[in-house]
Amino acid sequence: MSLAIVHSRALLGLQAPEVTVEVHLANGLPSFTLVGLADTEVKEARERVRAALQHSGLDFPHNRRITVNLAPADLPKEGGRFDLPIALGILAAAGHIDAAALDGLEFAGELSLAGDLRPVRGALPMALALQRSGRGRTLVLPRRSAEEAALVPGLALRCADHLDEIVEALQPVEPGDPPTPVLPRPRPVEVREGAGLPDLQDVRGQAAAKRALEIAAAGRHSLLLVGPPGTGKSMLAQRLAGLLPPLSEEEALESAAVLSLAGRFEPADWARRVLRSPHHSASSVALVGGGSPPRPGEISLAHHGILFLDELPEFPRGALEALREPLENGRITISRAAQQAEFPARCQLVAAMNPCPCGMLGSTAKPCRCTPEAVQRYQNKLSGPLLDRIDLRVEVLAIPPEELTGAPDGEPSRAVAERVAEARRRQQARQGGSNAELDAGQLNEQVRAEPEATRFLNTAASRLGWSGRSLHRVLRVARTIADLAEADTLGVVHVAEAIQLRRALPGR
């Protein structure tokens, strides 16, 4: 037959809409035309496909007019994922493989000039989209991409390393002929365990900061660590992942799908919480996403994980301001003239900063040499609305030398993680999510504050001039403190600790 249809999928944000690859061979002047709103990478598939077929010993129809249509025509297509379906469509239209066998299959893969299959971005979103569509097709991917897609339960999946393997499996079978070989399933990936995470006990002293880290982990609260250089702010942030409970299967799939979309997912890291730590020179597009087509930024790549921003005031002001809405809503919508994409962004923000340009404000080791104007100018790089969205603000002071050289103190991460897990279970049973996700309508019902605690909080809010958002965030933190204490109602002691953990910056 001169017409063949192959099924594949494009990527549009985290969605993977179905694409029908239609290949038509006709008489006429030899040509190879590719239509269907394809970008440059897709159009370059013509040369990759031609060379791959020839190098694999397969017939390429040089003397025919080849037309490839990627439908729907108004859906943008990008990347090299359509190389494999285009090559198979040409072979099916020329009668070299069984076109009927293509109906129950979906393909994606980039071809080398020698016919080898290379992995593609977004294998997990494609697999999830196929599973949710209910079409019952088998997905055929390069081996490395198939190892990612195999993490989706209940998916019919096959893999290959070379174009020849797929062509062999799709040969027409006549009565009496031996059966064609079956493509293999991807082998299970050995998942790395999280035992290698750094331990909280390695941090000497800093009892207040460790307590804040435990509260942040228990309620999924954002945290700002303020202190002189070398006091352990980065060490504390890196140990937060060891306090968090394991990801559920749904959360692990969501996190892995975003990383797969950016080509940064390793199957061996399945179900491990991500710690993203971008450099302070990162732009707003790098942090929240953007580009054309839209790609996820650091706040989305850290979905269900940790976004650590060290040297917070050194980030561009516009980049930090772009974080305000996704920190509040847990998602980011990127709009461009041609298309719009939405990415999840429910991560836990941990930031660290020095209190002043020289870093020694409030330190007992060295005097601060900054003028009040310089301190104010430095701290004003962080806007009030951004600071308002950070639940916990804690000072991390310098540790005396005798403590640093002494034996490790405090609890190991495992003991703290057990209390965190128990607090998370209480929250899940009570409201179906973490305390940081409570909206204003749920606060009165779920917080259950005693009258004395409410009066104490209202008095503090009036004296400190808090906004409504600040008041609600202190209530959420106090609820987490009560959960760690296994208390059903919110007392004055819980509110007082939550207020202490929301300090103003030093010098303000």
Image: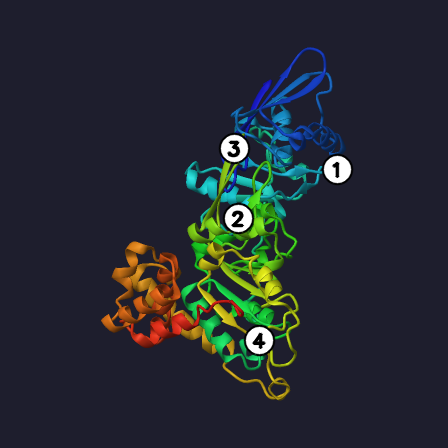
Q: Position of residue 394 (x, y in %)?
A: 50, 71
Q: Secondary structure at mark 3?
A: loop
Of the image marks 2 and 1, the number of the one nearer the N terminus? 1
User: In this rendering, would 181 be left or right of 426?
Assistant: right
The foreground one among 458 and 130 is 458
Instruction: Quickly name the residue at label 1.
Output: 114
Residue linked to disc 4: 362
Label 1 to label 3: alpha-carbon separation: 35 Å
* x and y percentages locating residue 258 in the rendered image: 53, 48
In space, the residues marked 2 and 3 are separated at their CA atoms by 20 Å
Identified by mark 3, the residue type is Gln
165 or 139, which lies in front?
Answer: 139
Q: In the rendered view, would you say 362 is above or below 223?
A: below
- Disc 2 to disc 4, C-alpha distance: 30 Å
Q: Is residue 437 visible?
A: no
Q: Name the side, left or right, on which 253 lies relative to 287.
A: left
Seen in the image, is 459 located left or right of residue 280?
A: left
Q: Judge from the rendering whether residue 268 lies leftward or rightward of residue 385; answer left or right.
A: right
Mark 2 to mark 1 CA distance (whole Å): 45 Å
Mark 1 vs 3, N-terminal side:
1
Mark 2 crowdedness (10 Å alpha carbons): few <14, some 14-19, many ≥20: some
Amino acid type for the residue under numbered disc 2: Ala
At 33% from the left and 77% from the top, the residue drawn is: 493
